Amino acid sequence: MLGLCRTISLLILVATSQLASAASALTEHALSVSRSMSAFYMYSLTDGDGRYQEDYQKFLTQADQSLAAYHKQDSLAAAELKASWGKLRPSLKFDFVEGAGYIIPVPVRNDYRDYLSLVYKKIGEVIHRESNLSEQLALMALSVEVMSARYFDISSALYGTMSISTNDAVDPTKMAKIFKQRLKKFEKIKLAAAIKKDLGAVGRKWEFIEDKVTNYKGEAAFFLVYYNKRQISKLLNKSQVKLAGA
């Protein structure tokens, strides 16, 4: 009987570990897709600045790799994403039009936007609860990247917010509210001074860009948004590492 209990416990542990790994791979994929979108449209907004081309190509490759890892861990759950990404991925390139710059066809833009929304929705289905502080930090980093990606999408789109679907899973206003709630929760928790300092910096940098990425104000501020969202992600990642080592 004792042996049976141990076997069951081991099976539960293995299953839990596999689910956590799959969720991690999906989160990494969502992060990479978000970052690729920000850089992709930043390249267009800067009339072809090579730095952003390097960024979006790097993040697209990371998106490929993380999706492959997710599919390996849970092929059934990843099937829809794999099919959609496989169709979208070859289309993510620009047409250069003299006098108009770097153009992406509207159908491709819509598919890119829909894919990010689909991935973000999948995150909510897989991660049903925040099991630990590290996971909360990861979700905070993801929400900032997703909101920023949507901002750059809208900033470079001809029709702006008019082209957004009414049933879109990405709701920047709601996401920003949850982000600030999580940040406030961390302020009340006893943590190492270094983590507190980093999260304080996260809050200050978020104040710089919140209104822009939620209300799409100041479209010309994309340099400010791109820089600060990267800094926020770095600080949240640092906090995760420090938390793990505490």
Image (tube, helix red, strand yellow):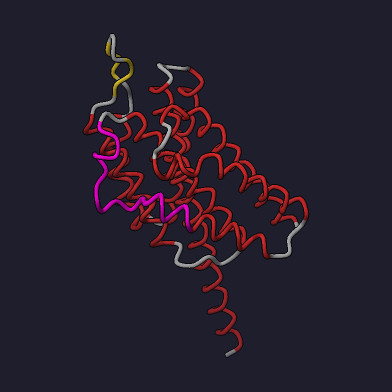
Indicate the quadrant where residue 137 lies: bottom right
Q: Residue at x 34, y 28 (%)?
A: 156
Q: Percent position (x, y) of residue 28?
A: 49, 47
* Quadrant in the picture for the C terminus: bottom right
Residue at the limit of the structure toward the top, as seen here: 98
172 and 141: which is toward the camera: 172
Indicate the quadrant where residue 158 lies: top left
Q: Residue at x 54, y 64 (%)?
A: 17
Is residue 31 shown left or right of residue 155? right
* Quadrant in the picture for the N terminus: bottom right
In magenta segment, residue 168:
yes
Q: Percent position (x, y) of residue 70?
A: 43, 51
Q: Percent position (x, y) of residue 170?
A: 36, 50
Indicate whether 146 appears above or below 102. Answer: below
Q: Residue at x 33, y 45 (%)?
A: 82
Residue at the limit of the structure toward the bottom, as seen here: 1
121 and 210: which is toward the camera: 210
Q: Percent position (x, y) of residue 95?
A: 28, 18
203 and 227: which is toward the camera: 203
Is residue 159 shown left or right of residue 140? left
Q: Which residues are magenta?
A: 159-177
In magenta segment, residue 183:
no
Q: Residue at x 44, y 66 (%)?
A: 128
